[in-house]
Image (cartoon, grey):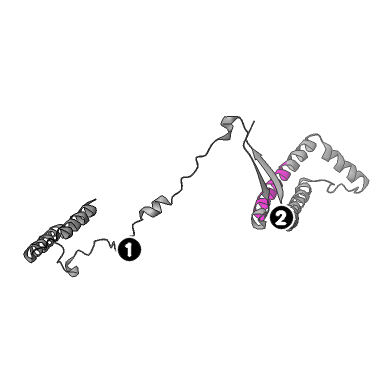
Amino acid sequence: MESAAAATSVAAVRQAGYAEDPDAKTQRREAAKSKAAVIDGPTRHIERKDLAKDMPDLSEVRHSGPAAETRQVAQPAAVDPREGGDVLRATIQLRKIDPWSTLKISLVIAVSLFFVWMVAIGLLYAVLDGMGVWDRLNSAFTEIVNESGDGGLVSAGQVFGYAAVIGIINVVLFTALTTIGSFIYNLSSDLVGGVEVTLADRD
């Protein structure tokens, strides 16, 4: 608005054929210099070496213009579809299984199942031992095969030893098969696509 008013006054002066006095021009220049000195403040003529060293450097600061603000698009508000009675559903496709993560999780599961297997064998052995099954089996074996009566057919060391060997074999096989299965699944998903899974809210 001020620039438009100044342009209007200059045009009016030119139209009137008014010739400005050189002394008036000089006075206006001096007044502008004095105003600039007041606005700039007392630090205008200070050398840079005399300025404080801990002042932040603002030369790299760039202010965003109004055009950048106008380019911001308002994000749509998330609407919960359950308010309208519809159930939220999403269908996803399982395309790849990481073999390394499969190896780790299958190894943890296999070791856990190994301890479960050993506990189950221990409980079963204790129950059958309380029923006297092992004593009868050992006595029958010694009467038929070994007349001297040294040793028996079944002992606690033998039962837990064989159970531990079987459990370790199961751990190795389970871990290897799940890891190889992840490789096979990745190859198959590249050919025909992965398994589709539909996720939905509870009814």
Q: Is residue 94 magenta?
A: no
- 17 left or right of 191? left
Q: Kindly identify which residue carries mark 1.
A: 60
x and y, in percent, of residue 26 in the image: 9, 65
Q: Residue at the front extreme? A: 16
Q: Kindly identify which residue carries mark 2.
A: 182
Q: For the residue labelled by badge 1, is the local secondary structure a helix, a strand or a loop? A: loop
Q: Say which quarter of the image contains residue 156.
A: top right
x and y, in percent, of residue 46 in the image: 15, 66
What's under tag 1, amino acid-wise? Glu
Residue name at image x 16 percent, y 64 percent: 44
Q: Residue at the right extreme? A: 144
x and y, in percent, of residue 37 in the image: 13, 61
Nearest the viewer among 127 and 95 is 95
Nearest the viewer among 118 and 1 is 1
Nearest the viewer among 178 and 113 is 178
Q: Is residue 153 above or below residue 126?
A: below
Residue name at image x 46 percent, y 48 percent: 73
- 157 left or right of 47? right
Residue name at image x 78 percent, y 49 percent: 158
What is the distance, in whole Å, between disc 2 and disc 1 at their CAs?
52 Å
- 78 left or right of 88? left
Q: Earlier in the sequence, mark 2 or mark 1?
A: 1
x and y, in percent, of residue 179 in the image: 71, 56
Q: Residue at the left extreme? A: 23
- 7 left or right of 188? left
Q: For the residue labelled by badge 2, is the local secondary structure a helix, a strand or a loop? A: helix
Assign the C terminus to one quadrant of the image.
top right
Q: Is residue 188 above or below residue 144?
A: below
Which range is magenta?
A: 103-119
